[in-house]
Image (cartoon, rainbow, N blue to C red):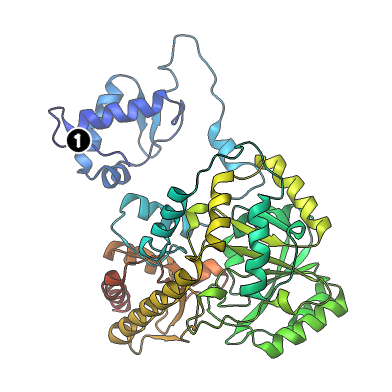
Amino acid sequence: MWKPDRSSKKALYEQIADYLEQRISYGEFPPGSLLPPERKLAEQFDVNRSTVISAFAELRSMGIIESRIGSGTRVSTSKWGATPKHTPNWSRFAEGGSFLPNLPFLRRIREALAHNPSLIDFASGELSADLAPTDEIAALMSNNAYTSYLGYVNPQGSTPLREALVDYLTNYRGIRTTESSILITSGSQQSLFLITQCLLSPGDAVAIEDPSYCYSLPMFQSAGLRLFRLPVDNHGVQPEDIRTLYKKHRIKMVFLNPNYQNPTGAVLSEERRRRLLDIISELGLPVVEDDPYSLTSYDGVPPLSLKSMDTTGSVLYIGSFSKIAASGLRIGWMVAPRSIVERLADARQQMDFGLSIIPQQVAGQFLQSAYFAPHLERLRIQLQFKRDLLIESLEKELSGLIEYVVPVGGIHFWCKLIPSIPDGILLEESIKKGIVMVPGSVYGSDSGYVRFTFARAKSDEIALGISRFAEALRELIK
C-alpha cells in the first residue's frame, strides 16, 4: 500500500496531492465520485489529518476536487474540459449486479490487515508460511522440467493430477473413484460456486449447518437460494432435522462440513453419519460434503468421510490443498457422478478455460512424492502445538470469560463469550489492540461467539494475540 516517502525533499502533503491526482486521472475516482474522508486517508497514509487537509487544499486550488459542508469532498465535474462530458456512474455499477459483496465484517478485517500487516491474524483461514511444504515443492520444481505443452488442458483438469487424486482419495479418505469422476477446481469455494450456480435455481431451498462457513459466503444469497438451518452440537447435525426441513420446505440439497467443522470444530459422529445417509437415500436428497480438514486430525486417524460410506451415489465430495498444503497453489477437487462433472466442467470452461497447468503438475507430483506423508505428520504436530498454545493463553487470560470445546483436528477454535458484547464493537476494539479475529455472527450464530484461527498466526504471536484480545474484552466489560 502506497505511503508518502518521508526521506523525500518534497513535502508530504504535496506527495499525497500528486498521488490522489494520479488516481483521479487513472479513473479510479471518476468525476463526481466521493473521496475517502480526511481522517481515513490520514490513517492510511500514516500522517496527521492536517497533512491531508493541506493536500486537499492543493487539489482544490487546481480545480481537481470540490468540497461542500456536510457532503464531503468530491472529484470536480467541471475540470475535465470546457465541454461537459458524461462519465459512467461507476458507483451505481459497483452497487449493482446479482453477485453480492463480502459481508461487512469480512471487508473490515481485510481492510484492517491491508492497512496494518503487523496485526496478529486469528481471522485468515490458511496455513502460515512455516506450515506449508515450501522446501518440498521447491525441490520438486527444481528436479522436474516443466517442458510439456502449456496450452489448455482437459476441462476437468490435468489428467495426471486426477490420476494422482484417485490414489490419494483411496489411500487417505477411503473413497473409490476414477479420474473421469473428478473435477479440478481452484478450491472449495469455486466448487461451491459451481454447484450453487449450475445445479440449483433461484428460490430453491437448501439446508446448511448452523453455525456454518456457508453463511460467510454471499454466493448462496447471490444465487437466490433459501437457506434453512441445521443446528450443530458437539457431535454435528441431527439427521432427523434434515427430514423435518424436507417435509416443511422441500429442501433440494444439503451442505455439510462433517469433519472438524468450520467454525465449531465439531465432528459428526459415526452413528449420525449412518442415520444421515439412510435419510438422504430415502428422500433422494444430494449432500455436498466439504472436507478440507480431515487430514489435520491430531492423532493421525482422520474421521471417515461421508463419501466413503455412500452406497447410493448421493454425496458430492469437495476437497482442497488449501488447508493441508498451500492455499496459493489454488488446487481443489470435486468427486461427483460423471454427468455432474461434465456439466460443471463445461460451466467452468466458460469462466476461465481451465486452471494453470503448472500448479496442477506440481500438486500431482507432490501427492505421489515421498514428501507428502512426512509433511502431513509435521503439519499435524505443529497444528496441535499451536492449538495447545492457544488453550494455555485462553486459560491464562480469559478464564471465567469464555466457554469452549477443545477441537481434536482442524485449524479453528470456537469460543462462546460469557459477557455480552456487540460483535462490531468487539472487532473494532480488537483491531485497535493489534489483533483480528472473526465474530461468530459471520457464520450465522448469535452475537457473543468468536472464531480464532490458529494456523495463520506464528507460534510466538499466539500468547500476545490472546493477551491483546483479553485487554480489548475487559475494557468493553468495564
**Residue 45 vs residue 315: left or right?**
left
Residue occupying the far top of the picture: 82
Asked if 286 appears above or below 41 in the picture, the reply is: below
Whether residue 321 appears in this view of the structure is no
Q: Is residue 82 above or below residue 390?
A: above
Q: Is residue 43 left or right of residue 291?
A: left
Q: Can I make out residue 277 in this image?
A: yes
The residue located at (81%, 83%) in the rendering is: 278
Q: Residue at the spot x=74%, y=46% of the render?
A: 347
For mark 1, does the 10 Å Cα neighbourhood hold few (<14), some (14 to 19), or many (20 or more) residues?
few
Viewer-side residue, 348 vs 245: 348
For the N terminus, the image quarter is top left
Which quarter of the rendered picture does the C terminus lie within?
bottom left
The image quadrant of residue 169 is bottom right
* Relative depth, front residue between 68 and 474: 474
- The residue where tag 1 is placed is 5
What residue type is disc 1 on?
Asp
Closer to us: 245 or 76 = 245
Residue 143 on image: x %, y %: 45, 50
Say which element carries label 1. Answer: loop
Q: Is residue 289 left or right of residue 293?
A: right
Q: How far across and down, in percent of the image, does residue 196 sit?
A: 72, 57
User: Residue 165, image x and y in percent?
Assistant: 64, 62
Residue shown at the point (24%, 35%) measured from the top left: 53
Residue 307 image point, x, y percent: 72, 74
Numbered-mark total: 1
